[in-house]
Image: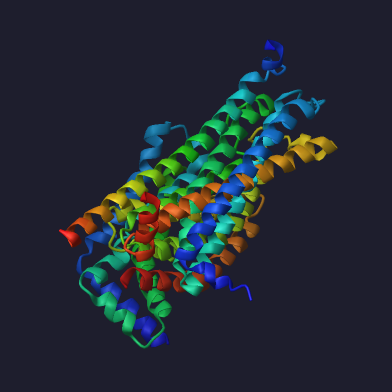
Amino acid sequence: MSEWLAMGGHGLYIWGSYAVTALFMIVEVILVVRRRRSLMQRLGRMIRMKDSEVSG
Amino acid sequence: MFNLFKYASPASFYPLAGRLAMGFGIASVILLVIGLYMSFFVAPTDYKQGEGYRIMFIHVPAAWMSMLIYVVMACWAAAGMIWHTRLSSMMASSLAPTGAMFTFIALWTGALWGKPMWGAWWVWDARLTSELILLFLYVGFMALESAIDDPRRAARASGLLALVGVINVPIIYYSVQWWNTLHQGSSIKVVDGGVETSMSEIMVWTLLVMTFACWFYTIAVALTRVRSIILERESGASWVKALLQERKS
Amino acid sequence: MLATLRCMVMRDLTLAMRHRSDVLTTVFFFIIVVSLFPLGVGPEAALLKEMAAGVVWVAALLASMLSLTRLFADDYNDGTLEQLLLVPQPLSLIVLGKVLAHWIISGLPLVVMSPLLGLQFGLEGDELMMLMVTLLLGTPVLSLLGAIGAALTLGLRGGGVLVSLLVLPLYIPVLIFGAGAVTASAAGMGADGHLSLMGAILLLALVLAPWASAAALRISVE
């Protein structure tokens, strides 16, 4: 296993590049999803406020 | 007759984008897993570079994606300006962050691949240099878009910048190519990706699978982001209110 | 057609001459930036001679960037820009007039000063001439492309920094061919290729840039 990880001496470079790529892709997905969720809540609150004004 | 412009209105595009994003997202995950498996276990060791060349399976797709996304962004921007459809410029601004990310990944993996191959983290190779300039173009696009408050003006201004940029990309690429060959003596003798020319069948397939994985990933992320942009820009619209009511109950 | 162009150029030049210091600030910025490099890099002549063209060209780029924001800002602030948009003449012609005036104010002085600074770096006769020619061909392109950036970032906070971020990547071909021409001619390889390419970029910019800045102006002023 460790010999496979060493990747013929280039392990640092290979895992370095794949790790950063994976990190960036995952972080981007998380950011997009979180942006969507917080937006949904904010809009929900805004609409509830409007409804309460109208009915109040 | 399938009316293309039916989906130009954000209201009808929104649910479609949701389904598409889900579909492409799952497809990209599957392809990514297959691609990673192929690039590490199926692809043979390269006679010249040993294992180091495996970075190619992420570097090359990222570089292709960074250029492809910029061109697609410019097309959406052009469509937005010609037909004045707000949705097209929303698509352009939703693609920019993913394009910038792929450009950075292409630079990062290029540097890490360059270290064992050329012996230096950064080499003023023509492709790496024009990739760096492409990153500046992406950053300029996003900076301009965030600097303008009124969304309509932001969309059209950044759209025009994308169009001006896309005309300049080939000019920049060839001038950097010219500049690189002119100063060939001073920079390190660049091995022109020896691996790519003598690529075996399996390597080509792995590269294709990884490229499609990145492509589907981009579509999924861009569509999800465009849905948020639609909601932000159309928050006053009645269909948004109806959508939220139905979600809440 | 030429009347509108001439009238725009004369108008902008008279406006610029009223507060003459702007012209001088651009030139002095250029001189100071170029003179900084020997202090940073060290005085030995061989090294300075080799990097002279690149240093002068980068300084010219930055100097022309300095005065870009003012290209449309004054007219935008006091409302004449809206009137200019309503003028029956084509807007790109008016923009070309303003860019020409901006080039005369900020580009031409750099061309005139460049031999003096070339001497500072130990360049000889024909290299100085080549430096002047490349700057003469290049600085109009800087003003033309810069006008697009200035028009796009009209009235934005932090517009100055934003313009350089937008426009510098577009300047790179001009920088490469400009500096490359001088080093090529110094090395005796002849710079006709570089000069013809710069001429081509100049013509391309002359045709497309005013139209693009006019479109950008319409977007910004709405």
In front here: C9 or B244? B244
Residue drawn at point x = 72 percent, y = 17 percent? A8
In front here: C13 or B78? B78
Q: How many marks?
A: 0
Residue C43, quarter of the rendered image:
top left
User: Residue B89 at what x, y percent from top left?
Assistant: 47, 62
Q: Is residue B223 left or right of residue B45?
A: left
Q: Quadrant of the C terminus of chain A?
A: bottom left
Q: Is residue B86 left or right of residue C11?
A: right
Residue B127 appearing in the image: no
Q: Is residue B35 above or below residue B94?
A: above
Q: Is residue C60 above or below residue A14?
A: below
User: Residue B58 at what x, y percent from top left?
Assistant: 65, 36
User: Residue B70 at what x, y percent from top left?
Assistant: 56, 54
Q: Is residue C56 left or right of residue A42?
A: right
Q: Quadrant of the N terminus of chain A?
A: top right
Residue drawn at point x = 84 percent, y = 38 percent? B201
User: Residue B51 at what x, y percent from top left?
Assistant: 73, 23
Q: Is residue B205 left or right of residue B33?
A: right
Extreme-front residue of the structure = B249
Residue C194, quarter of the rendered image:
bottom right
